[in-house]
Image (cartoon, helix red, strand yellow):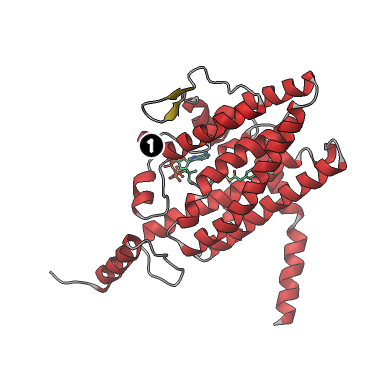
């Protein structure tokens, strides 16, 4: 049997993955690895950018200057996360323009969670607590992902997401110490966001087409179900401290497993939202497209300026 150059490259790649070393942009990589990374990192970047909309909705109506300053800073952080991640995909040969076109035309996905509306200011706190909380559970292991630029971007992103989670919890805690009406607002918000937050981790492992290969390549370090369990275990004691009820009658501690048992989200609803038929999908993409079109003159001016400088 003849050993080709490609076989040798594949062997080196496999050895790097087995040593838990990083693959860097200049290294050879299988085409499937590159494509999977572009898909996952682009979806992640789009989620950060589209994720600015539900909370951005409340910037003009924040209840105080302090809350407005916090919210502005958080939404701005999400834009930064999107930019680090688009930069990471650029190292794989996918341009930001190309990815933005794929997002706007519906060819690439973004997280299902951002297709739900934000109906009250409590949602700002719940997004911080549950959505950023789920994002941290999912993203801390990604700091050890096998692709260097993605892992390094995740380190900074995770630090900022931890702050986001804390600010959400603090906002909810403040409301829980307030009036009956405020407490009811928090509970109503948690009732709406709990199940969509569990869906953020993706389909159950048995229905996840990408997990096995992504784990073998060291792109993902944990399965969807493992991370979902970690999130539930982390959130239940926090809900107790807050004094809110999680809307799951099956939620209870299982001594034998050393974990909480919990019910299943509505996976049919998840499939619908991912297909584009969630409550806000059309609005989110239309808004993103409008912002992109409105920014055309800025991109043209920057390109003309760059050409003049050469
Ligand atoms: N929504 O085979 P799997 C944030 C798709 S950032 C929509 O399990 P995989 C910050 C999946 O892409 C939140 N689509 O896929 C923030 C695949 O698509 P395909 C985003 C979903 O990739 C906070 C198909 O279903 N975080 O929140 C979802 O192995 C507050 C089959 O699924 C990341 O992107 C979903 N929830 O595992 C911002 C983290 N789940 O192949 C603002 C990085 C799955 O049909 C405010 N990503 N799909 O095209 C990951 O860890 C993985 O990509 C998973 C999915 C775990 C999301």
Q: In the visual, does 154 lie left or right of 18?
A: right
Q: Residue furthest right?
A: 65
> Does the image show residue 62?
yes
Residue at horizontal 51 percent and vertical 36 percent from the top: 231
Pointer 1: residues within 10 angstroms few (<14), some, or many (20+)?
some
Mark 1: secondary structure: helix
Image coords of residue 241 (percent x, y): 63, 29
| Quarter of the picture holding the C terminus | bottom right
Per the image, the residue denoted by label 1 is: 205
At 53% across and 35% down in the image, what residue appears? Answer: 234
Snapshot quadrant of residue 238: top right
Q: Nearer the viewer, residue 227 or 13?
A: 227
> Measured from the top left, where is residue 157 in percent x and y?
60, 54
Which residue is situated farthest in the top direction here? 249
Residue extending furthest bottom? 310
| Residue 134 percent location from the top left of the image | 56, 39
77 shown above or below 174:
below
Q: Is mark 1 within 8 Å of ligand 1?
A: no
Q: Nearer the viewer, residue 44 or 169?
A: 169
Can you say which quadrant of the picture contains the N terminus?
bottom left
Q: Residue furthest left?
A: 1
Q: Residue at x 77, y 61 (%)?
A: 297
Of 145 and 50, which appears nearest the observer? 145
Indicate the position of residue 154 as horizontal and vertical percent values. 55, 56
Question: In the rendered image, is residue 196 in sight?
Answer: no
Task: Using the image as rendered, state which of residue 144 and residue 209 is in the foreground.
Answer: 144
Q: Residue at x 43, y 30 (%)?
A: 259
Q: Is residue 277 above or below residue 310?
A: above
């Amino acid at each position: 049997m003849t050993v080709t150059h490609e076989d040798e490259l594949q062997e080196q790649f496999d050895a790097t993955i087995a040593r838990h070393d990083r693959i860097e942009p200049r290294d050879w990589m299988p085409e499937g690895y590159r494509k999977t990374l572009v898909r996952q990192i682009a979806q992640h970047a789009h989620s950060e950018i589209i994720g600015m909309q539900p909370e951005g909705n409340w910037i003009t109506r924040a209840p105080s200057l302090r809350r407005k300053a916090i919210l502005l800073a958080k939404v701005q952080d999400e834009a930064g996360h999107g930019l680090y991640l688009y930069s990471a995909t650029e190292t794989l040969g996918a341009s930001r323009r190309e990815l933005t076109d794929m997002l706007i035309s519906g060819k690439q996905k973004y997280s299902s969670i951002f297709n739900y509306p934000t109906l009250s200011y409590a949602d700002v706190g719940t997004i911080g607590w549950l959505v950023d909380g789920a994002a941290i559970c999912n993203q801390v292991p990604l700091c050890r992902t096998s692709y260097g630029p993605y892992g390094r971007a995740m380190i900074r992103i995770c630090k900022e997401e931890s702050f986001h989670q804390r600010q959400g919890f603090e906002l909810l805690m403040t409301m829980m110490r307030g009036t009956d009406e405020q407490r009811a607002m928090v509970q109503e918000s948690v009732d709406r966001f709990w199940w969509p937050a569990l869906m953020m981790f993706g389909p159950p492992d048995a229905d996840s087409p990408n997990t096995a290969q992504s784990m073998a390549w060291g792109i993902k370090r944990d399965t969807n179900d493992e991370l979902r369990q970690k999130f539930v275990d982390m959130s239940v004691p926090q809900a107790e401290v807050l004094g809110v009820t999680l809307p799951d009658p099956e939620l209870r501690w299982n001594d034998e497993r050393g974990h909480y048992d919990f019910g299943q989200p509505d996976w049919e609803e998840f499939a619908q939202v991912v297909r584009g038929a969630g409550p806000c999908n059309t609005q989110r993409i239309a808004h993103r497209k409008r912002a992109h079109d409105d920014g055309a003159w800025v991109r043209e001016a920057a390109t003309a300026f760059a050409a003049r400088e050469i």
